[in-house]
Image (cartoon, grey):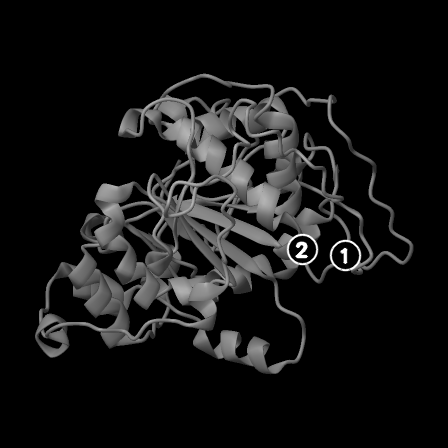
Amino acid sequence: QTHTMSSFLSRPFNLLLILLVGVALYLNTTSILYSIHFSAAAGSAGCEPQAAYDSVPPAHKNPRLPSKPIPQSRLNLLSTAKPIELTYVDMAYDLNKEFPHKGAKDEQGNWGYVHDETALRKNPPEFAFPNLDRACAIKDDQRMVLTEKVFVDLESHEAAEKSGQKRDKIFCLVYTMSTGHDQIPYIRETWGPKCDGFMVGSNKTDASIDAVDIPHEGAEEFDNIWQKVRSMWAYIYDNYYDKYDWFHIGGGDLFLIVENLRLYLESEEIKVAANGGVYLPDGSETVQTPLFLGRRFAFVGDMDDIFISGGSGYTLNKAALKALVVHGLPNYFLHDHTFSEDRMIAQVFKKMGIIPYDTKDEAGGERYMPFMVRGLLSLLYE
C-alpha cells in the first residue's frame, strides 16, 4: 500500500497537548488511531462470496441519497458481502462443549462471569501522571509528531454531543494477559472511559482494571493469540451484541482517539456503506452490510490477500460481528494456533465475501496508524 501523507503535511492541527504528549511519553505507546479525515481509491481484493449464511436484500421505502456517493472502488469492496439480518442468534453452548463459547471466570475461578462493561465509563479514575511538567518539556520527535501532526476534532465532537441526536455506541476491547496488566491503568485513565463499553480480555479476572479471564483452546502465549481472540469475540457477541453499534479491538499498547473514531463511524460515508453503499439508512433497517475497518495491508504484496494490521486494531459493525461469530468462527480455522490473529480474522471474513473497507480520507491519508510514533517521523517530514 502506498503511504500518502499530503493531509498530514497540509493541515493545521490542534489537540490537548499536555494529555496526548504526556501519555505518549509516559506509555511509549506503539499504536495510535489517528482520525484526520482521510480517503483515496484502492483496488478491490479478489474473493468468492460465501452464500451459506442468512442474508436478505435491504429494502428502501423512501431512499435518500448521500451528499456524495461512495467511489466505485469502495463499492467494489462492498459488493461481495451479503447483508446480514441483525437479529441476535443465541450461540452460547453448554459449559461442557467446546470453545469459543464457554464464557468467562470470575476472580474466584467460577464460570459464568459477565463483566459490567459500563463500569469504567460510569466511574473513570483520576488521570494521575507523575512529573507531568517535566515530561511535557521534552522536545523530541514524539512531541513533534503529536503536536504538529495529530488532529483531535474536538469542535465536531462537542457539536455532536450538544446536538441532541443519538450517538453511535462503541465497545472497546483490549487483549492482554496477566503479565500485561500493568499497562491497563494508563488506558483506563485516558481513552478507555470515552468508550461506551470497555473490557480487557485476559487470563485473569481483575474487576478493578476491567480484566476478564476468558479461557480458550491451547496455551496462554503470544503464539496462540488467534485462539484467545476467537473466545473473546464469542464472549462479546454472547453478552453485549444488542447493546452496541460498533466493536473495536486492539492490544494493550493501543491509544485510541475515541472522539475521532466515533465521528468517522457516524459519518455519511460509513452509514451509507453499512446500508449497502448507495442510500442513507432511515433507522428502520433490519439488515446491515458487514464492515471490517482498519489499516489495510497486502500480505507480501499480494492484493488478493488483504488484511488489517492488528497494531492499531480493527473495528466491526454489528453485521460483521454477527457474521464472524455465527458463521465464521464455527466453520473456519477452528483449531489453528498462531500469533497472526489479524490475518486469520481477515481470512475468515474473506471466506464470507467480507473485504477490509478502505478507510483513507479524500487526500489519501490513513486514519488507522499501526506504527510507533517515532516511526512516523520520516514518513511525515520527507
Compared to 285, does 345 lie above or below?
A: above
Q: Residue visible at 31% across and 67% down?
A: 189
Residue in view at x 71 percent, y 46 percent: 277
Left or right, 149 with respect to 305, comes to: left
Query: Which residue was labeled with disc 2?
Result: 271
Q: Residue at x 37, y 45 (%)?
A: 108
Q: Looking at the picture, how far across and down is residue 312, in whole percent? A: 37, 47
Compare residues 162 and 304 and report the one nearer the observer.
162
Q: Is residue 277 left or right of residue 111?
A: right
Disc 1 to disc 2, C-alpha distance:
7 Å
In what element is the residue under mark 1? loop
Decide which of 209, 303 is in the foreground and name it: 209
The answer to whether mark 1 and mark 2 are in CB contact below 8 A is: yes
Tell me which amino acid carries mark 2. Answer: Lys
Query: Which residue reaches farthest right?
Result: 61
Task: Count neighbours of disc 2 (C-alpha within 10 A) and say few if under 14, some if 14 to 19, many if 20 or more.
Answer: many
For residue 193, above or below residue 276: below
> Against 108, is 265 above or below?
below
Who's the residue at 62% across and 48% down the image?
A: 241
Q: Within 10 Å of the Cα at label 1, are there few (<14), some (14-19), or many (20+) other Cα atoms?
A: many
Tell me the element at label 2. helix
Residue 78's quadrant in the figure?
top right
Residue 194, visible in the rendered structure: no
Q: Is residue 322 left or right of residue 135?
A: right
The picture places residue 339, in percent across and down from the top left corner, at 33, 27
Q: Position of residue 221 (x, y in %)?
A: 28, 29
- In the picture of the structure, the residue carrying the numbered disc 1 is 281
